[in-house]
Amino acid sequence: MRLRTDWRASFALVGTVLKYLSVPLVIPVVVALIYNDPLVPFIATIALTIAVGHGLELLNPEPDLEVREAMLFVAISWLAVAAVGAVPYVIAGWGTGSTLAHPVNALFESMSGFTTTGATVLGEISLERHSHAVMMWRQLTQWLGGMGIIVLMVAILPELAVSGAQLVESEAPGPQLQKLTPRIAETARILWLVYFAFTVVYIAILYGLHLAGAAPNMTLYNAIAHGFTTLPTGGFSPEADSVAAFSSIVQWTAIPFMIVAGTNFALFWHVFSGESHRFVRNTEFRAYTGAIAGFAVLLAGILYVGSAPALGELGGVTEGVVENSLRQSAFQITSLLTSTGYATSDFATWNSTGQVVLLFAMLVGGCAGSTGGGIKVVRWLIIFKVLRRELFTASHPEVVRPIRLGGNIVDEDAIRGVLGFSFLYLVIFAIATLVIMLDASRIGYTLTPLEAFSASLATIGNIGPGFGSLGPFGSYLQFPVSSKLLMIFLMWLGRLEIIPVLVMFTGGFWTR
Amino acid sequence: MRLRTDWRASFALVGTVLKYLSVPLVIPVVVALIYNDPLVPFIATIALTIAVGHGLELLNPEPDLEVREAMLFVAISWLAVAAVGAVPYVIAGWGTGSTLAHPVNALFESMSGFTTTGATVLGEISLERHSHAVMMWRQLTQWLGGMGIIVLMVAILPELAVSGAQLVESEAPGPQLQKLTPRIAETARILWLVYFAFTVVYIAILYGLHLAGAAPNMTLYNAIAHGFTTLPTGGFSPEADSVAAFSSIVQWTAIPFMIVAGTNFALFWHVFSGESHRFVRNTEFRAYTGAIAGFAVLLAGILYVGSAPALGELGGVTEGVVENSLRQSAFQITSLLTSTGYATSDFATWNSTGQVVLLFAMLVGGCAGSTGGGIKVVRWLIIFKVLRRELFTASHPEVVRPIRLGGNIVDEDAIRGVLGFSFLYLVIFAIATLVIMLDASRIGYTLTPLEAFSASLATIGNIGPGFGSLGPFGSYLQFPVSSKLLMIFLMWLGRLEIIPVLVMFTGGFWTR
Ligand SMILES: [K+]
Ligand SMILES: [K+]
């Protein structure tokens, strides 16, 4: 049988991606040299990326990708990078009793990194238990994943007309989007510049706070480590207590940067090009900041009247204190809504009302064209516009009313794509919840419904922490291997907007 | 300002409906005569229905309804009937300490009856506490509500082109659907005949089991009472323990009749017209029975391996006993999936995995054209076909592929309507969950997330019981009045397929 899809071309380009991966692997090598950590895990992985990358490139020296091949390339490259990125964990963990010595755990942590999810199976998160180099590699995977997502969201997916992804273009016609040609690099370079600039500024502010004495434990290592995981809405932290380990001022500082991370990166280009008005007028950005503000005010009220964990606990919420309620609420809503996943409080101990508010915030997601995961704000915007139109046409059946976004009419095919995608997301979320519950109860691990819902949503939405035992100060370690494999799949699926991964499993993709 | 909608015409027809309501009110009068119960509650209500009904009819002696007026008529008639139907509860309860003496509780119970929901605020369900006549009226409201729904689903909504309702027609072209003219009565009469026949057969079988000694407590009163609430997927029972109060054979007997109640009633017409093959070939019916079977097998497995309440409790599930696991599973899935709401076990005490399976079954709903509530099977069918198409077109962007249902192409507008309706349903469900949680915590009543989700879903889906304290052997009595008013609204909304109620709250409905 002759395959219709030229998989050789896709795999050859995956080889190129793997070869490029050897460059950032130099960073953990440098960290290892500074801290006298073992070098083998990283040197070996560099050799592996170059060898495998080169081997794959031989499959097709001049790969030319059509729609199908591009999808396959996208899907396989995330899987391949996650697999190779897991190698340092396995080698470094070998014989030390580290949970990451188990290949499935290592792949989980690596996929969680490169998809910027932030769910962890690390067990004990500490620099005594794991080397500085391994912990920095873990942070770096998220920053690299964020780079990949920017290219994916703004340059690749819109060209593939993946449901709703083309909306990024209609809303943000800033940097001209190009065909899948060498010029893709130009678009990517502009957005990477924005990403890089924000990362540097954030690290500088964090370390500045440290030097000013306002953040005693925000060392240069910690500043860089958090710089690597904020802009990609990643959420990994080398601190077991996440951002709760740092002072209030650090927590307040993180909020605007998480908001930036969930914003369409193309919009910042308008600011740099002196067209700031296009930024504030952007419908999705306004809905996004409105949603954050609305959720945060609601939750702050709930926390203020006292639905909080006991005072004095680490990251506890102090009932009746305005600053504390506002900070905890604003931080946690921003963190979960944008799919970052940092925590300043063990929200797994909050009361059920607060947790349901957080669960709903987790369904929102970032803006299209950002590093945020989830259903995304632009899709919700279109859904709400469709619902309003349904109500209107029910009593005005004779009127044809197009849906507008930022002044442009949204194509009806795109609308169907948005509704279809969102349903696919919810259906997979629901089925995965049930499978995770059944699988856990098989080994006698009883999940509450909220824990199960959050396990599924936090992975497909690339958010990271869930509720209960998989809360922000917990981990996914206790799940059976089969559930971990499912969650690895969910993170992969969610990060790539579902379709490019799922089509591979349809017969029509390979034949006709 | 001149209103665009001729509300006088709608209200005049509501008057006619109210006048007709006086006829079935004779039944509780007869019951009261037999059991020597007070007659005043019912005689007074009969006088009220005739007086108010006649008064409303004077608004427009020859009402002529367009789309808007028909929607208004549908929405207001359910509200008016529920309000008048609550009067016997208030009068009968007055001074007796009955929970129904409170008008909001009475309206809740009445709306729950006429929308065939089956959620109760009765507190103590017993014939010692409430008269036989009042308890039979409660059962009868569901049977009357079911009659109304048949007309609504098969004759009115499809003409209004309410999202997805027109699909009933394309799938079931049996009795020709007519314009909103006097001929509506003809269609209705055929379907009522089916409804009436099944009710009579069911009552006869139940009482027959009693006479044969297989159902000691299934007296004639109980047989009629359950006959009144099975075919309308109602779920009210005069027994505090619902169907758990009866023998296994009664429980097995109820299952096929609940399945019938959730089936498109027009399909039975094919059987009576000698076209049975059209029945079994019906796509929605096959998906519906398939969903019941799939959920039931999954749940039976869960119950069999022991996720059950303690053995020996009333309605307890006996781990490791095939008949018991199968019966409890088949009964509970059928009951909740079809939105009936009967219980043979206190599933509120099952483990969380079993409860999540039940929660998902509650999202399915009956077939279009049945008395079942919820999102409905035909909408899920279309959603899954849309998802499959999305995956297909992602790798075949050049192919235009229509969606077929039972051999007919489904119009793209109808598809958008289905997706829109389903999202509207889910969004209202989510918002209501949050409001119910917040409102409950205001009075210090803490709901688990599952309880809150089920309170919202069981009312908008017209199912009845939820989980936890609002489980099948519990009640909604403990909710604050504000939440009860919200739930009354949700039952009303869900029963009328949302749109006819919600459009009234849009400005465009009244003006332009
Ligand atoms: K994340
Ligand atoms: K019901």
Image (spheres, coloured by chain):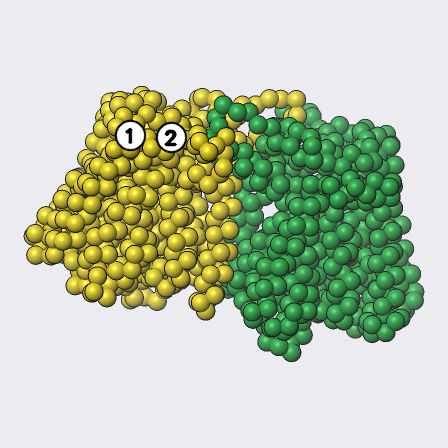
Chain colours: A yellow, B green
**Mark closer to the chain start, 2 or 1:** 2
A75 or A157: nearer the eye? A75
Q: Chain of mark 2?
A: A
A84 or B137: nearer the eye? A84
Q: CA distance from mark 2 to mark 1?
A: 10 Å
Percent coordinates x, y for residue A464 in the rendering: 35, 52
Is B119 situated above or below A162? below
Q: Answer with left or right where residue A367 lies relative to residue B10.
A: left
The residue shown at (31%, 39%) is A77
Q: Answer with left or right where residue A412 lies relative to residue A139.
A: right
Q: Chain of mark 1?
A: A
Few, some or many C-alpha atoms within 10 Å of disc 2 (few <14, some 14-19, many ≥20)? some
- Residue B394 visible in image: no
Q: Amino acid at mark 2?
A: Asp
Percent coordinates x, y for residue B103 in the rendering: 71, 57
Few, some or many C-alpha atoms within 10 Å of disc 1 (few <14, some 14-19, many ≥20)? some
Q: Which label belongs to residue A60?
A: 1
B508 or A423: nearer the eye? A423
